[in-house]
Image: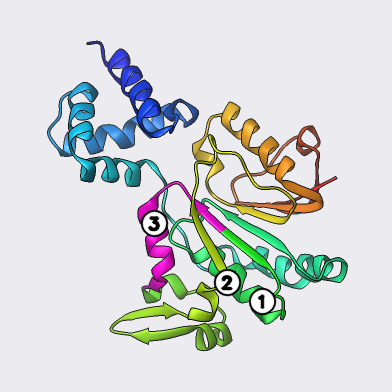
């Protein structure tokens, strides 16, 4: 089978089995990543690799882990979180006593826990709703466990580090009081329907892996999921060049407000 046809057939089968549409990811990046994984197991074609995935659940889980991007840090790009804490959250709380917040593609949990720590410091966590979703059930499990290596905490403010983490056997464990305030849930952003009336959606450093068509779909879905005046907070490489087409206006660098 021709190489392009081999990969195209693999994409079709994966979508049928998992509802994950690999055609909506940038092909060169995804194909390179999956080719490396396929060859690691000694398969010459994606046809052979597919048969192995069908027969071996652990190989399917490994595939899912590899095709999702699980890089996360607490307070990633701290200056942007500072804007959220000092400007946008106070603005929201002045209008609404209870906030509805979503960390989309939350990976191993650093992002929703950062949100929880900030809301806690503002005295708003207990009366807010915080949803965290990801495609990969493996990273969601790690997020729910809340155990991190010290390097993940490098940008955590010292006071928050002292208050919300407990050191145990070389790891730093997140406070149970934060865990209890976050609902973790598996979700396919491109395929699944979204909840609505969010005050804030955080989706950072994920869009860069999607095609332009997939980005367009997602920005529209995020806009529909926000309440008027709600904010979308994106990553440092994910500027929206025509926010108005999705019903957004630029609120600050990497923050977009639904009009």
2 or 3: mark nearer the eye: 2
Disc with the residue nearer the chain's start (3 vs 1):
1
- Which corner quadrant of the image does residue 81 belong to? bottom right
Cα gap from disc 2 to disc 3, whole angstroms = 18 Å
- For the point 37% across and 21% down, the residue is 12
In the image, which disc is placed on residue 181?
A: 2
Which residue is nearer to you in this view: 86 or 8?
A: 8
Which residue is nearer to you in this view: 112 or 79?
A: 112
- For the point 62% across and 64% down, the residue is 130
In the image, which disc is placed on residue 192?
A: none
Asked if 125 appears above or below 258 in the picture, the reply is: below
In the image, which disc is placed on residue 139?
A: 3
Cα gap from disc 2 to disc 1, whole angstroms = 7 Å
- Which corner quadrant of the image does residue 132 belong to? bottom right
Dots 2, 3 in contact, CB < 8 A = no
- SS of the residue under disc 1: loop
Disc with the residue nearer the chain's start (2 vs 1):
1
- SS of the residue under disc 3: helix
Check if residue 15 falls in the magenta segment: no
In the rendered structure, the answer to whether residue 68 lies left or right of residue 50 reads right
Tell me which segment is drawn in magenta.
132-148
Q: Quadrant of the C terminus?
A: top right
Can residue 243 be spotted in the picture?
A: yes
In the rendered structure, the answer to whether residue 191 lies left or right of residue 80 reads left
3 or 1: mark nearer the eye: 1
- For the point 22% across and 21% down, the residue is 47
Q: Which residue is mark 1?
A: 126
| Image position, residue 238 (x, y; %) | 62, 44
Dots 2, 1 in contact, CB < 8 A = yes
| Image position, residue 86 (x, y; %) | 76, 73
Disc with the residue nearer the chain's start (2 vs 3):
3
């Amino acid at each position: 089978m021709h190489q392009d046809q081999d990969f195209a057939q693999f994409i079709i089968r994966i979508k049928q089995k998992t509802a994950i549409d690999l055609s909506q990811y940038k092909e060169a990046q995804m194909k390179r990543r999956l080719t490396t994984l396929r060859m690691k197991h000694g398969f010459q074609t994606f046809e052979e690799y597919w048969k192995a995935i069908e027969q071996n659940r652990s190989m399917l889980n490994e595939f899912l882990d590899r095709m999702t991007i699980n890089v996360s840090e607490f307070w990633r790009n701290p200056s942007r979180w500072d804007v959220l804490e000092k400007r946008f959250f106070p603005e929201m709380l002045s209008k609404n006593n209870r906030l509805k917040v979503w960390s989309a593609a939350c990976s191993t949990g650093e992002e929703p826990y950062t949100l929880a720590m900030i809301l806690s410091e503002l005295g708003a966590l207990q009366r807010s709703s915080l949803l965290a979703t990801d495609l990969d059930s493996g990273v969601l499990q790690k997020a729910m466990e809340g155990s991190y290596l010290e390097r993940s905490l490098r940008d955590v403010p010292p006071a928050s580090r002292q208050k919300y983490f407990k050191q145990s056997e070389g790891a730093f464990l997140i406070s149970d009081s934060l865990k209890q305030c976050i609902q973790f849930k598996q979700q396919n952003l491109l395929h699944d329907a979204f909840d609505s009336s969010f005050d804030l959606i955080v989706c950072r450093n994920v869009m860069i892996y999607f095609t332009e068509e997939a980005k367009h779909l997602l920005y529209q879905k995020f806009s529909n999921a926000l309440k008027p005046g709600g904010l979308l907070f994106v990553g440092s490489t994910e500027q929206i060049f025509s926010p108005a087409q999705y019903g957004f206006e630029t609120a600050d660098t990497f923050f977009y407000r639904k009009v």
